[in-house]
Image (cartoon, helix red, strand yellow):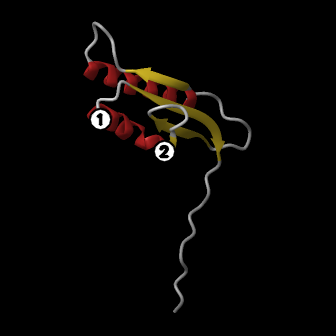
Amino acid sequence: MKKTFKMTHPKIKVDRLFEATKCDIRKYLKRERNKTLPEGVDFWDFDCKFGTTEEAATMVHVTELPKCIDGAQEQSLEAFYVEILAKPGIRTKKSTPQDSE
């Protein structure tokens, strides 16, 4: 998903547009996560970018997208850019420090 969301509409209130944007992003993530996984892959991972324009977008974690949208709402932005690209992910075990006694 590569999309510029516009937060101006003649009939819809701005707060409702921001909530609809978050809902669209959640629906997209759910749809992507429900796709069948390729062989040898544990989960779907996402590369996300957020910014006022496509050129100014910076990398953010998928869990930070709602916070970024809330920040855009506080700044009263008229438009913002969101990019979400799904990629296969493989879980790695966390290394545990060994106790030396």
User: Which element type, helix, strand or loop, lies under badge 2?
Assistant: strand
User: Which element type, helix, strand or loop, lies under badge 1?
Assistant: loop
- Going by the numbered disc 1, the residue's amino acid type is Gln
For disc 2, the marked residue is: 60
In this rendered view, identify the residue nearer to me: 71 or 33: 71
In this rendered view, identify the residue nearer to me: 56 or 97: 56
Say which residue appears at 31% left-offset and 35% top-offset: 70
Say which residue appears at 49% left-offset and 31% top-offset: 53
**Disc number at residue 1?**
none
Q: Mark 2 to mark 1: distance in Å? A: 18 Å
Q: Is residue 27 left or right of residue 9?
A: right
Where is residue 64 shown, x and y percent of the image?
Answer: 41, 43
Extreme-right residue of the structure: 39
- Going by the numbered disc 2, the residue's amino acid type is Val
Q: Is residue 49 left or right of residue 17?
A: right
Q: Within 10 Å of the Cα at label 1, are there few (<14), some (14-19), or many (20+) other Cα atoms?
A: few
For disc 1, the marked residue is: 75
Q: Is residue 61 left or right of residue 16?
A: right
Q: Within 10 Å of the Cα at label 2, are there few (<14), some (14-19), or many (20+) other Cα atoms?
A: some
Location of residue 44 with respect to 90 vertically, above or below: above
Q: Earlier in the sequence, mark 2 or mark 1?
A: 2
Say which residue appears at 42% left-offset and 38% top-offset: 65
Name the image quarter holding the N terminus.
Answer: top right
